[in-house]
Amino acid sequence: MQHGAIISLISLAALAGLAGCDTSASGDEVSRFAPQYDSVETRLLDGDLVNFHVTMRGARGIEDVDRYAACAAAQYTLIRGYGFARHVRTNVAEEGGVWRGDAVYTISAALPRGLKTIDAEVVAADCAEQGIPMV
C-alpha cells in the first residue's frame, strides 16, 4: 500500500469516528433545562398597545424570556377577542439568576403590517404544548 493511501485510510477512520459525535446540545444539557416561570404582569398602555412584564428563573438566555413574553401576549390577545399581535420591543435583564422581560406588543383583529407578527392561536397552542404558562 502506498504512503498516500495509508494516510487516506487513517483520515477516513478518524472521520468515521467523528461521525458518531454529536456536536449539538447533549441530552443532559436539554434535560437540565428546568425554567421557573414566576410571573406575568400585563398593562394596557393605549387602545391596542400592551406591555408585558415577565419574570423567570433558569432561562438559557434572552430567547427564553422573549418566548415567555410572546406566550403571554398570545393568550392576552385571545382573551381580548383578537387574533394577532405584533412585537414592538423587548428589553431583557438578568440579575442573580432572575430574568426579567419588559415587552410591548400591539394587538389586532387582522394581521398587522410588519415582520414580527404572531398568530395568537398558533403561538398559544405551541406555548401550551411546550408547558410555558400564559396570562
Image: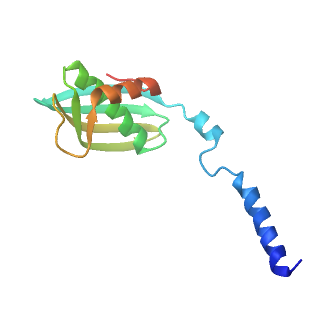
Q: Position of residue 5 (x, y in %)?
A: 82, 75
Q: Residue at x 29, y 32 (%)?
A: 53
Q: Position of residue 30 (x, y in %)?
A: 58, 37
Q: Please tell me which residue lies in front, 104 or 78.
A: 78
Q: Please tell me which residue lies in front, 7 or 114.
A: 7
Whether residue 131 is visible, yes or no, is no
Q: Position of residue 91 (x, y in %)?
A: 30, 44
Identify the image quadrant of residue 50. Answer: top left
Q: Residue at x 22, y 33 (%)?
A: 85
Q: Is residue 48 left or right of residue 58?
A: left
Instruction: Give the answer, above or below, for where 53 lies relative to 11.
Output: above
Q: Position of residue 81 (x, y in %)?
A: 19, 20
Q: Residue at x 20, y 45 (%)?
A: 114
Name the colour scheme: rainbow
Identify the image quadrant of residue 113. Answer: top left
- Check the picture and name the quadrant holding the N terminus: bottom right
Q: Is residue 23 left or right of residue 88?
A: right
Q: How many marks?
A: 0
Identify the image quadrant of residue 107. Answer: top left
